[in-house]
Amino acid sequence: MSEKEASKMGAKELSPIDVYMLLPRTNCKKCGQENCMAFATKLVNRELALELCTPLLEEKQYVKAYRKLWDLLKPPVKEVTVGAGDSAIKIGGKFVMYRHELMYANPTAIAIDVTDEMPDRELFDRLKKTDGFSYTYIGRELKLDMIAVRSTSNDPKTFKAAVKKVTANTDLPLMLCSFNSEVIEAGLMAAPKTRPLLYAATDGNWKDMAELSLMYDCPLTVFAPGNLKLLRSLVKTLLEYGVKDLVLDPGTFPLEGIAETVVNLTMIRRMACKRGDELFGFPIIGTPIVTWTQKTEAPEISMWNEAYLASILITRYADILTMHSTEGWVLLPNAFLRENLYTDPRKPVAVEPGLREFGEPDEASPVMLTTNFALTYYTVASDIESAGLNCYLIVADTEGHAVDTSVAGRKLTAENIAEAIKVTQVEKKVKHRKLIIPGKAARLSGEIQELSSWEVLVGPRDSSEIPKYLSEKW
């Protein structure tokens, strides 16, 4: 598709006034905002939900306005649900192409594959590893999301048996993978009402796959490797046929094909977000698992190739990944990347300020201070817990900034530290009046002492040195 063709689909940038003109404009404050213009601004910034304007939902005179607003505010990339019940996940739902514009919605889902010809022991082991993958990172639990059941046998009975084993041993959402519609149907019969993602419809089997998607109410992947015109044409055909929940696969090409892969994914997302092309406005799937089709000297090389390809795809617009490796050194870095990429760029990751207790502190236990930047807090907390210390920790509200930047930017001041001491009422828990502050906040010690009447001790610059510091100084 040429740039000239794309430019014909240009989408107007949404402004608060566009939204405001469709709101009731009664300034009723039922949405929690002072007036309708404030609510419109929050809607455009995706900070509030349209449903908070209850008159739009309850009064008949606003029915048409609500529909227009819904069309205006819906994401350029449609949100698609995979799975059913509590285990269902959402993919897509993106409003912007670039993270600095607005927070990305729905983190990239990671699916681990099993095949229908795997020995039971290997299959169950992979399910156990996928289900059991868990890591706590700055207070958040990182998990894997899906199981991709691939048919390597191309036999409906074999695939059906494999899907039954999978559903009996995990509640994770499924992706059923085969280009043979009979195989896919056998898998669907083994997992009724689980709403798996079907992979995949092509120019050769689209009608049969569409029938299954409609019959079982399942999202459907559209596969056209390296051919965006064909991909777009298939999407148009499937939409006209009645299939609404689609996932796009333009192909993932490893090694020397990575550049083409990135260009294709970028063009799809650009057409949806910048040009308003609704035929490309669906979640994208990437398949770093394809690195295993390349011959390598050792499996570790394939794992490495899969790991870095997955990181590229997470960064360049994939909403779901299919992977083969179950090793922690492959998955964990990508889970970290995903977690960091899908935070709100408008505000740092922060924890609630207040007083925390570690171990079993008493009236003689030390009182320490840190900021509410999540990474800082959880690093300090981890070092305290691993040392088995009994202490109090005041978490000051610095709007999610670390100690050094908080001091430099006047987010951590003697005034707000003195206020934090009062608000937490820590003086009721200890007999002493001694506060240990981070070494990077040393220059505030004198002012804190004057304002709070507490003796201020300057602690280590690194929280890993807290146990040693307390043993020598406390």
Image (spheres, helix red, strand yellow):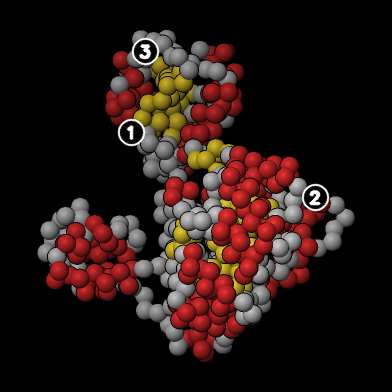
User: Does residue 315 appear anywhere in the picture?
Assistant: no
Residue drawn at (57%, 75%) of the image: 208
Q: Quadrant of residue 65?
A: bottom left
Picture layout, residue 72 above or below residue 197: below
Between marks 3 and 1, how big is the CA–CA gap?
Answer: 20 Å
Residue receiving disc 2: 300
Q: Which residue is mark 3?
A: 430
User: 294 or 148: which is nearer to us?
Assistant: 148
In the rendered structure, find residue 416 and report the number of the disc placed on it.
Answer: 1
* Kind of residue sitting beneath label 2: Glu
Q: Amino acid at mark 3?
A: Val
Query: Dot 2: what SS?
Result: helix
Decide: marks 1, 2 in contact (CB < 8 A)? no
Q: Left or right of 280: which side holds 127?
A: right
Looking at the image, is mark 1 or mark 2 nearer the viewer? 2
Residue 336, x across and y down, in percent = 58, 47
> Given contact means CB atoms under 8 Å apart, are the residues at marks 3 and 1 in contact?
no
Secondary structure of the residue carrying tag 3 is loop
Residue visible at 40% across and 79% down in the picture: 11
